[in-house]
Amino acid sequence: MKAKLVITPKKAVLDPQGKTVANALEHMGYAGVTGVRVGKYIEIDLAPGTSAADAHNALNEAALRFLSNPVIEDYRLEIVE
């Protein structure tokens, strides 16, 4: 079982790295890009026998306390079998 955690800046927070990527895409000829948000992707392997509910609860806590900055970042957690 794995956990996948995607962390991105909140919509209200400026994302200079995302802006740079969007500008580069435009200059390279990729039309139609209206915005880019650059974040982090974390994949966590879970021990056999770990329940999805326990993993979800523990990793939600870890995401709020350590893996993300809840003041400026949002996160999405997915547990996959």
Image (cartoon, helix red, strand yellow):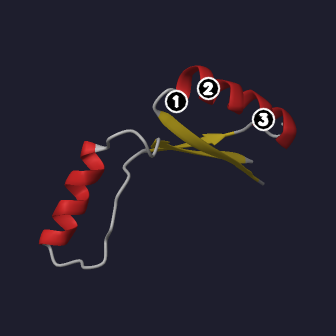
Q: Residues within 10 Å of mark 3 (few under 14, many from 20)?
A: some
Kindly identify which residue carries mark 2: 64
* Location of residue 66 by image quarter: top right
Question: Which tag, 3 or 1, sits closer to the chain's start?
Answer: 3
Name the residue that disc number 1 marks: 68
Say which residue appears at 77% left-offset and 37% top-offset.
Answer: 56
Q: Position of residue 9 (x, y in %)?
A: 43, 41
Q: Find numbered disc 1 in the image and state the secondary structure of the residue it sits on.
A: loop
- Res 27 quadrant in image: bottom left
Q: Position of residue 5 (x, y in %)?
A: 59, 44
Horizontal side of 69 relative to 54 (left or right) equals: left
Residue type, label 3: Ala
Mark 2 touching mark 1, by CB under 8 A? yes
Above or below, 74 relative to 79: above
Q: Is residue 51 visible from the viewing direction of this image?
A: no
Quarter of the C terminus within the rendering: bottom right
Q: Please give the residue where the numbered disc 3 appears in the rendered image.
A: 55
SS for callout 2: helix
Question: Disc 2 or disc 3, which is closer to the eye?
Answer: 2
Q: In this view of the protein, can residue 80 be seen by the observer?
A: yes
Distance from the alpha carbon under mark 2 to that under mark 3: 14 Å
- Residue 22 rendering spot, x and y as whole percentages: 25, 61
Callout 3: SS: helix
Residue at position x 64%, y 25% from top?
62
The one nearer the camera, 39 or 23, is 23
Q: Are marks 2 and 3 in contact (CB under 8 Å)?
A: no
Q: CA distance from mark 3 to mark 1?
A: 17 Å
